[in-house]
Image (tube, rainbow, N blue to C red):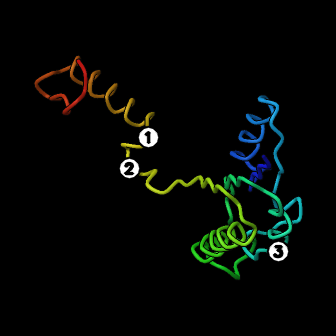
Amino acid sequence: MKIAVLGATGTAGTRTASLFAKKKISVLAVSRSTGVNLITGEGLNDALRGVDVVIDVSNAFPQDDAMGLHEALTSATRNVVENCAAQGVDHLVFLSIAGVEDTIFDVFSCGSTKTSDHIRWRVDPKRYPTRQGASR
C-alpha cells in the first residue's frame, strides 16, 4: 500500500509521517518543498501516481495577496479531490479544523470550563451555580 501525506513538512504532517515511520510504514511526503503546489495543482497529479491512500493535513494558505484565503483553500481542496479521482486513489483522509470553535470538539476547553465551574462553586456555591454537566 502506498500512502501520501499532503503537507508532510508542516506541524500535523511531520507528526503524521512520524507515526507511520514508527510502525515501519513508508509514506510519500508531499509538500511545496517537494515541488507540489496544492493551490495551483502543480506537481500533484504526478505525486499521486500509484498512491492508494492520501492523508491531507495541509494548510494551503496563499503565498501572496493575489488570492484570498477562501479561494486558496477551495482551490487546494478541489485540486486534491480531482487528482485523487484521476489517479484512482482508494481513500482520502482530510484533516480539517472546521467547527473547532465549538467547545464540544475542544476537550481542553471543555475540561477547563468544568474545572472553572468546580472551582467557582467551591468558592461560593450561591453566587456561582454549577453549569449543567459540571461535576462537584
The image shows residue 17 at horizontal and vertical percentages of: 77, 41
Q: What is the C-alpha distance between the residues marked 3 and 1? A: 35 Å
Left or right: where does residue 9 sit relative to residue 85?
right
* Residue closest to the eye, 52 or 121: 52
Residue type for callout 1: Asp
* Residue closest to the eye, 129 or 79: 79
The residue where tag 2 is placed is: 102
Looking at the rendered structure, which numbered label has been put on residue 46? none
Residue at image position (42%, 51%) is: 101
Q: What is the C-alpha distance between the residues marked 2 and 3? A: 35 Å
Residue type for callout 2: Asp
Mark 1 crowdedness (10 Å alpha carbons): few <14, some 14-19, many ≥20:
few
The disc, 2 or 3, on the residue closer to the chain's N-terminal end is 3
The image shows residue 22 at horizontal and vertical percentages of: 79, 29
The residue where tag 1 is placed is: 106
The residue where tag 3 is placed is: 42
Q: Secondary structure at mark 1?
A: loop
Mark 2 crowdedness (10 Å alpha carbons): few <14, some 14-19, many ≥20:
few
Q: Are marks 3 and 1 in contact (CB under 8 Å)?
A: no
Mark 3 crowdedness (10 Å alpha carbons): few <14, some 14-19, many ≥20:
some
Q: Are marks 1 and 2 in contact (CB under 8 Å)?
A: yes
Rendered position, 123 above or below 93: above
The image shows residue 2 at horizontal and vertical percentages of: 80, 49
Q: Secondary structure at mark 2?
A: loop
Rendered position, 93 above or below 80: above
The image quadrant where one finds the C terminus is: top left
